[in-house]
Image (spheres, rainbow, N blue to C red):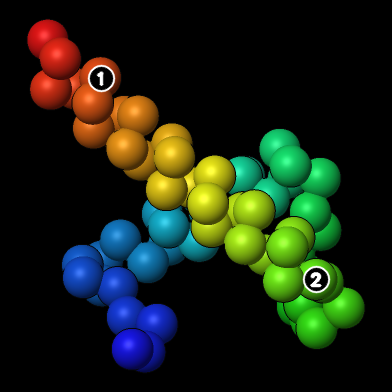
């Protein structure tokens, strides 16, 4: 599956979210990311998903 975003208008916000999460984890995303390990990249994606699930659960718990 290609790297597609469901709401194209959200692309900028998702990119900012990715960069903030990477920064929190100490992963240096830049123009070229070929020197990063799969573990580093995966940790960013995993943390993003964890945060989104947590936000959804908090929203619906009220």
In the image, residue 60 sits, relative to residue 7, either above or below, namely above
Label number found at residue 21: none
Q: Residue 37's mark?
A: 2
What residue do we see at 37% from left, 67% from top? 11
Rendered residue at 12%/22% (across/down)? 60
- Which comes before the other along the chain, label 2 or label 1? 2
**What residue is disc 1 on?**
58
In this picture, residue 18 sits left or right of residue 39:
left
- Nearer the observer, disc 2 or disc 1? 2
- The residue nearer to you, when weighing 11 against 22, is 22
x and y, in percent, of residue 43 in the image: 64, 53
Crowd class of label 2 (few under 14; some 14 to 19; many from 20; radius 10 Å): few
Query: Which residue is rendered at x = 21% and y = 70% of the image?
Result: 6
Image marks 2 and 1: residues in contact by CB distance under 8 Å: no
Label 1 secondary element: helix
Left or right of 49 on screen, residue 60? left
Could you tell me if residue 56 is visible in this image? yes
**At which x and y percent is residue 62?**
12, 10
Position in image of residue 61 (x %, y %)? 15, 14
Q: Distance from label 2 to label 1 (Cα)?
A: 32 Å
1 and 7: which one is in front?
1
**Residue pictured at 61% horizontal, 45% vertical:** 21
Residue 19 left/right relative to 58: right
Location of the N terminus (image quadrant)? bottom left
């Amino acid at each position: 599956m290609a790297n597609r975003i469901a709401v194209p208008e959200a692309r900028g916000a998702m990119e900012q979210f990715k960069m903030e999460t990477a920064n929190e984890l100490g992963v240096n995303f830049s123009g070229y990311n070929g020197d990063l390990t799969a573990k580093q990249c995966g940790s960013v994606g995993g943390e993003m998903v964890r945060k989104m699930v947590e936000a959804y659960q908090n929203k619906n718990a009220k």
